[in-house]
């Protein structure tokens, strides 16, 4: 039975030792984040939590690179945000919208 289950990969911070496109191509993933309907009324969210990281691999002049830099600038490492190291991550606005949108 297990052999028939689909396999889905998600990006983690150690995956970015290769570029994002290579990772997605080699693992046959359609995007760094997506959602899959697994049964009526159920969906599986595959999130890319490296997107808002200082190590996201997005070019600094890209929209995601700029969004990540702005997020990190607005949330510096501090006593109130001790988790805000540049290797930590989060999801950007477009990914959050994808996660929250009702499934068609």
Image (cartoon, helix red, strand yellow):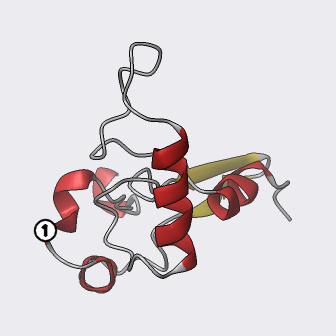
Q: In the rendered view, would you say 76 is above or below 93? A: above
**Image quarter for residue 27?**
bottom left
Residue shown at 31%/51% (left/top)?
2
Question: In front: 51, or 79?
Answer: 79
Residue shown at 77%/49% (left/top)?
100
Left or right: residue 102 versus residue 48 is right
How far across and down, in percent of the image, does residue 35 sit? 61, 61
Q: Seen from this angle, which residue lies furthest left?
A: 17
Q: Residues within 10 Å of mark 1 (few under 14, many from 20)?
A: few
Question: In front: 17, or 87?
Answer: 87
Residue shown at 39%/13% (left/top)?
79
Left or right: residue 1 versus residue 37 is left
Q: Quadrant of the C terminus?
A: bottom right
Q: For mark 1, give the secondary structure.
A: helix
Q: Seen from this angle, which residue lies furthest top?
A: 79
Left or right: residue 55 versus residue 73 is left
**Image quarter for residue 15?**
bottom left
Residue shown at 57%/76% (left/top)?
63
How far across and down, in percent of the image, does residue 6 sit? 41, 63
Residue under label 1:
17
Left or right: residue 35 versus residue 79 is right
How many dots with numbers?
Answer: 1
Q: In the rendered view, would you say 71 is above or below 104? A: above
How far across and down, in percent of the image, does residue 82 sit? 36, 20
């Amino acid at each position: 039975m297990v052999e028939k289950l689909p396999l889905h990969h998600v990006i983690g911070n150690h995956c970015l030792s290769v570029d994002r496109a290579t990772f997605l191509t080699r693992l046959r993933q359609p995007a760094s984040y997506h959602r899959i309907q697994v049964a009526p009324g159920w969906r599986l969210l595959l999130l890319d939590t490296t997107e808002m990281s200082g190590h996201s691999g997005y070019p600094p002049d890209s929209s995601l690179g700029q969004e990540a830099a702005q997020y990190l600038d607005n949330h510096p490492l501090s006593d109130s945000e001790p988790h805000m190291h540049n290797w930590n991550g989060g999801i950007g606005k477009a990914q959050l919208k994808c996660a929250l949108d009702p499934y068609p």
